[in-house]
Image (cartoon, grey):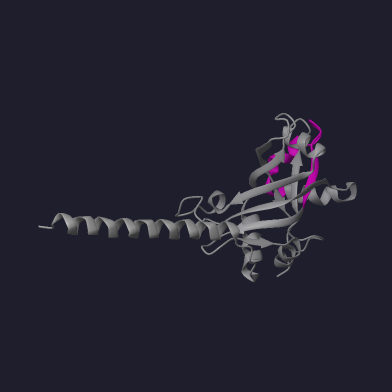
Amino acid sequence: MIGAPATALLLLCLGSALASAGATRVSAFHQVASSAVSAPEDAAACRHLMETNTWGVIATTSLHLNGSAWGNVVSFATAGPDAQVPGRVFFYMTPMDPTLQDLRADARCTLTVSALQSEGCSMDPEDPTCAKLSMSGRMVKVADEDVPAAKEVLFAVHPQMASWTGHHGFEVHSLDMNDIFLLHHYGGAAHVTAAEYTAAWKQ
């Protein structure tokens, strides 16, 4: 039988161990949030996420919420390695949608996709090993001469979109990205540049 002093000492040691474990866990997640180191495989992971997903959530600065952030589900398709701009991300949007209304007022936006959408994850979606990226930049309307090629890319992935043409003013847009925040393993997130992402599509 353990005496009172020994019991108190045991509880003190247990509390210290739990506190240490908690601090380690908080430190690990802080590292995930604060790291910005990019390795060659990070750009390849971004390419994989974008070519295996067909939809995501886009965040805009909302007009109907008076400047608050707002997210909406959008479909997209990425240009292949033989395209003029490999990996270029295309969208087919109508001005009836609040998303395009927001983007016309402020083109800055972020598209987020997760491996859970395409391949599934054995861990929780928020766990670092469940790969995810947030692609930030400015949404731009595709030039008239590039629309046919862009529609070909979009309609190959989303055949239903072909029936939307001529209705509700649908327009082809693309994301002119300037940063990709990628998290796909423990040890920290990575910031992948547009040049690194495009180069990964040429390999």
Q: Is residue 94 visible?
A: no
Q: Position of residue 22 (x, y in %)?
A: 41, 56
Q: What residue is rendered at 63% in x and 46% in y?
A: 56
Which of the image's four quarters has the C terminus? bottom right
Pick out the residue farthest to the left: 1
Q: Is residue 69 visible?
A: yes
Q: Position of residue 6 (x, y in %)?
A: 18, 59
Q: What residue is rendered at 31% in x and 55% in y?
A: 15
Q: Position of residue 84 (x, y in %)?
A: 82, 61
Is 127 displayed left or right of 90 in the figure?
A: left
Is residue 139 positioned above or below 88 on the image?
A: above
Q: Which residues are magenta?
A: 155-176
Is residue 25 positioned above or below 59 on the image?
A: below
Q: What residue is rendered at 76% in x and 30% in y?
A: 96
Q: Position of residue 95 (x, y in %)?
A: 79, 33
Closer-to-camera residue (131/83): 131
Is 152 displayed left or right of 11 in the figure?
A: right
Magenta residue check for 84: no
Which of the 4 image quarters holds residue 188?
Answer: bottom right
Pick out the residue farthest to the front: 5
Magenta residue check for 167: yes
Closer-to-camera residue (32/96): 32
Q: What residue is rendered at 79% in x and 30% in y?
A: 168
Is residue 105 positioned above or below 148 on the image?
A: above
